[in-house]
Image: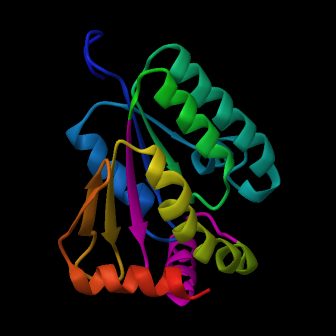
């Protein structure tokens, strides 16, 4: 955690189901010391055999925990699909409280890839996500990242995780400036956004 004199930060790791958010967070936590908050993890802790049955309760606990972190000026890493809009309100409150907002989005090339990754996770004992939720969230999570969450962040990074090379940094931005590092994956991202 940063020293008390340093600006606290909230790092939001977003992406569709199966994008590798939790894997990314684990590697990230080796580099910096922050508290990690995830509604999925809370649900698993509450009821590992049926996380879907406690999803609403886990979501409420998640919001309470991030609000408490803000009150305590604690730096946190938060994981979300970004398929909803409610977390944007929380990010604005963090920003108003003087936090640095950093957004990391992990993209996949298709709903099919997202579904396959979730199936692989389940085969290894991980949590499942209903197929209709994966489909419903996939496009929305990309649009919400770009149109809703990115403008709130002080800085953002877009990663692509659609092949065996792992998380590839595609683009980053600060304020209104964008740097594209991997144009082919940048185009893949825009193909998803334009698939209206």
Give the residue at the far left of this rendering: 181
Q: Is residue 106 magenta?
A: yes
> Which residue is located at x 52 percent, y 85 percent?
194
The picture places residue 178, in percent across and down from the top left corner, at: 26, 62
Q: Does the magenta stretch include residue 123?
A: yes
The picture places residue 152, in percent across and down from the top left corner, at: 47, 45
Please give left or right for residue 47 compared with residue 68 in the image: right
> Which residue is located at x 30 percent, y 82 percent?
185
Please give left or right for residue 180 compared with residue 55 in the image: left
User: Which of 43 and 25 lies nearest the eye of the viewer?
Assistant: 25
Judge whether residue 177 can be spotted in this image.
yes
The vertical placement of 133 against 8, above or below, is below
**Quadrant that contains the C terminus:** bottom right
Stretch in magenta:
101-129
Please give left or right for residue 45 compared with residue 183 in the image: right
The vertical placement of 76 against 185, above or below, is above
> Which residue is located at x 64 percent, y 49 percent?
44
Where is residue 53, by image quadrant?
bottom right
The vertical placement of 57 against 17, above or below, is above
> Which residue is located at x 67 percent, y 80 percent?
135
User: Which of 27 and 74 lies nearest the eye of the viewer?
Assistant: 74
Q: How is the image coloured?
A: rainbow
**Quadrant that contains the N terminus:** top left
Task: Tally the marks.
Answer: 0
User: Which of 26 and 84 lies nearest the eye of the viewer?
Assistant: 84
Judge whether residue 109 can be spotted in this image.
no
The picture places residue 67, in percent across and down from the top left corner, at: 61, 25
Please give left or right for residue 71 compared with residue 154 in the image: right
The vertical placement of 89 against 105, above or below, is above
């Amino acid at each position: 955690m940063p020293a008390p004199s340093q600006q606290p930060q909230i790092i939001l790791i977003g992406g569709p189901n199966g994008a590798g958010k939790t894997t990314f967070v684990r590697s990230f936590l080796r580099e910096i010391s922050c508290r990690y908050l995830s509604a999925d993890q809370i649900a698993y802790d509450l009821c590992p055999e049926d996380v879907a049955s406690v999803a609403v309760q886990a979501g409420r606990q998640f919001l309470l925990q991030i609000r408490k972190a803000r009150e305590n000026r604690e730096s946190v890493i938060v994981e979300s699909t970004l398929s909803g809009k409610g977390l944007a309100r929380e990010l604005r409150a963090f920003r108003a409280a003087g936090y640095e907002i950093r957004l990391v989005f992990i993209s996949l090339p298709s709903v099919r890839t997202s579904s396959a990754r979730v199936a692989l996770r389940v085969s290894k004992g991980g949590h499942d996500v209903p197929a209709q939720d994966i489909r419903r969230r996939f496009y929305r999570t990309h649009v919400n990242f770009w149109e809703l969450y990115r403008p709130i962040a002080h800085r953002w990074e877009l990663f692509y995780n659609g092949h065996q090379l792992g998380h590839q940094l595609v683009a980053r931005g600060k304020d209104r400036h964008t740097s594209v590092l991997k144009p082919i994956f940048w185009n893949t991202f825009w193909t998803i956004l334009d698939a209206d």
